[in-house]
Image: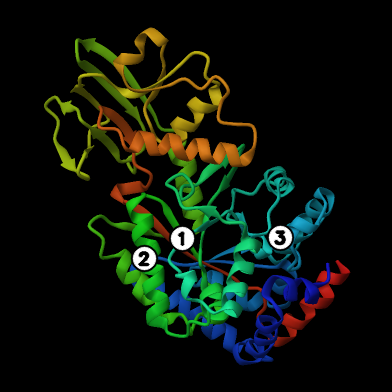
């Protein structure tokens, strides 16, 4: 991989030239500037009892172990950002495995704990997912979700070209409720990352106002909140000081919502989603229009019910259609079984998908269709291609969320939180020397 030609192709000549200039303004020959930026991000999150997640290439960690140890001791999570800063989409599966194994070995040698992986340029492939699974990562955070908060019609041709190049580089998914929620592929949790990020706004769109950037990120936060998703912001530490005002505005927006937003690290999201994946509902009909419910879940779970009547159980309003239920065993009255019915011909993967999304779901025959809030008959499953599966999963969730029928579900986030916010950042380089060493490292690995 020729890093210079790759950068010119993905940024455009003018943005590449501007990038070289910003290297000297944002980095120094010592660690001082980057340390200040990293500490700024940590400082901004502390009043919210939160900390960021940083990803770093192993060769950069190897040159700055004391700095990263200090950052980790200050509360930040450190994840792997490749062995060197190269695009995994240009590597064979064997090369990905080898380089990721070398990165793991470097982290272990330095005694830096890690749970997750983010690819440089968010450049993942199907082989990447398998490699990360085989090597035992708890999660990765590469799938980009695009939020349409930029008025592209107002951009000049040059700036529009640079912005569209970044969209092509990240291969972003459209924003849906499904896209904004983590999901398991085998044992690997995939946590989405939202764009536009700091690089797109500051460098490609050349928005220099922290207030304006904060406003755009707040629009994203509002949308994520409404869809009960996770807003994972990628804020490169080199722009930590530049983005201080924007981050403060975003955090104020997140904490001013009617229901709380969980501001946390990515490893905590991964830990929660694994915990939540074990939750189950057991429903038994005890009389006409009456069901006994047992929820097998932890104390952090929030049980939500819509269009049902709880028998002698207190509830709390959650939203316009749902209430939260404190009890883990209760009786309810409803005109239909408060679960999704799934036909016998529908593959098990569909039922597993519904359970991961937190919905009460049961096998049911065609004759029982009318007894359920919603009935799924998908004998061909979720689809054969990744794009088809994304569309099918997104549509299933949309249909279920629009239901005005009885239904039980587990909320997406712990302890009564409506959405999640995680501030992450890729430490591509610490010093000017690191930046230019990338050219040699990527070419020689």
- Determine crowd level at label 2: few under 14, some 14-19, many 20+ residues with C-alpha closer than 10 A: some
- Determine crowd level at label 1: few under 14, some 14-19, many 20+ residues with C-alpha closer than 10 A: many
The residue located at (48%, 84%) in the rendering is 242
Measure the C-alpha gap from mark 3 to mark 2: 40 Å
The residue located at (32%, 28%) in the rendering is 295
- Determine crowd level at label 3: few under 14, some 14-19, many 20+ residues with C-alpha closer than 10 A: few
Q: Are marks 3 and 2 in contact (CB under 8 Å)?
A: no
The spot of residue 185 in percent (x, y) is 60, 39
Question: Residue extending furthest right?
Answer: 444
The residue located at (45%, 31%) in the rendering is 354
Instruction: Work out whether mark 3 precedes mark 2 in sequence or the reverse, and give the earlier one.
Output: 3
Quadrant containing the C terminus is: bottom right
Q: According to the image, label 2 marks what residue?
A: 219
Q: Secondary structure at mark 1?
A: loop
Front in this rendered view, residue 282 or 219? 219
Q: Are marks 3 and 1 in contact (CB under 8 Å)?
A: no
Q: Is residue 262 left or right of 4 when viewed as pictured?
A: left
The residue located at (22%, 45%) in the rendering is 319
The spot of residue 364 in percent (x, y) is 41, 13
Residue depth check, mark 3 versus mark 1: number of the one nearer the observer: 1
Q: Secondary structure at mark 3?
A: helix
The spot of residue 328 in percent (x, y) is 27, 30
Q: Answer above or below: position of 25 versus 363.
A: below
Front in this rendered view, residue 153 or 385? 153
Q: According to the image, label 1 marks what residue?
A: 147
Q: Are marks 2 and 1 in contact (CB under 8 Å)?
A: yes
Q: According to the image, label 3 marks what residue?
A: 108
């Amino acid at each position: 991989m020729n890093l210079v030609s790759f950068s010119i192709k993905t940024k455009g000549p003018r943005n590449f030239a501007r990038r070289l200039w910003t290297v000297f303004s944002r980095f120094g020959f010592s660690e001082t500037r980057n340390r200040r930026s990293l500490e700024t991000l940590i400082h901004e999150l502390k009043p919210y009892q939160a900390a960021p997640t940083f990803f770093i290439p192993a060769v950069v960690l190897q040159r700055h172990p004391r700095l990263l140890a200090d950052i980790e001791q200050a509360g930040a999570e450190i994840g792997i950002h490749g062995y060197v800063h190269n695009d995994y989409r240009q590597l064979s599966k064997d090369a990905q495995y080898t380089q990721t194994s070398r990165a793991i070995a470097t982290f272990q040698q330095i005694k830096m704990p890690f749970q997750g992986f983010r690819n440089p340029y968010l450049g993942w492939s199907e082989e990447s997912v398998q490699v990360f699974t085989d090597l035992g990562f708890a999660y990765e955070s590469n799938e980009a979700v695009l939020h349409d908060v930029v008025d592209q019609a107002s951009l000049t041709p040059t700036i529009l070209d640079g912005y569209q190049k970044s969209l092509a580089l990240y291969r972003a998914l459209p924003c849906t409720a499904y896209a904004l929620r983590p999901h398991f592929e085998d044992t690997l949790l995939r946590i989405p990352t939202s764009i536009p990020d700091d690089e797109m706004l500051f460098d490609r769109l050349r928005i220099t106002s922290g207030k304006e950037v904060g406003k755009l990120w707040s629009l994203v936060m509002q949308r994520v909140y409404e869809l009960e998703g996770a807003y994972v912001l990628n804020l490169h530490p080199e722009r930590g000081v530049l983005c201080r005002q924007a981050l403060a505005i975003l955090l104020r927006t997140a904490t001013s919502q009617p229901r709380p937003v969980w501001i946390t690290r990515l490893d905590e999201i991964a830990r929660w989603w694994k915990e939540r994946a074990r939750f189950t509902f057991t429903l038994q009909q005890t009389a006409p229009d009456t069901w006994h419910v047992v929820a097998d879940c932890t104390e952090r779970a929030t049980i939500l019910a819509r269009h049902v009547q709880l028998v002698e159980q207190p509830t709390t309003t959650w939203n316009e259609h749902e209430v939260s239920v404190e009890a883990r065993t209760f009786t309810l009255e409803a005109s239909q079984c408060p679960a999704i019915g799934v036909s016998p011909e529908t593959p098990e993967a569909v039922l597993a998908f519904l359970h991961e999304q937190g919905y009460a779901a049961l096998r049911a025959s065609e004759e029982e269709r009318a007894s359920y809030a919603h009935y799924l008959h998908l004998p061909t499953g979720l689809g054969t291609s990744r794009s088809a599966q994304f569309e099918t999963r997104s549509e299933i969730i949309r249909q279920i969320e629009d239901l005005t029928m009885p239904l039980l579900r587990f909320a997406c986030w712990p302890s009564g939180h409506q959405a999640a916010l995680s501030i992450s950042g890729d430490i591509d380089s610490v010093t000017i020397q690191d930046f230019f060493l990338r050219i040699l490292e990527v070419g020689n690995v």
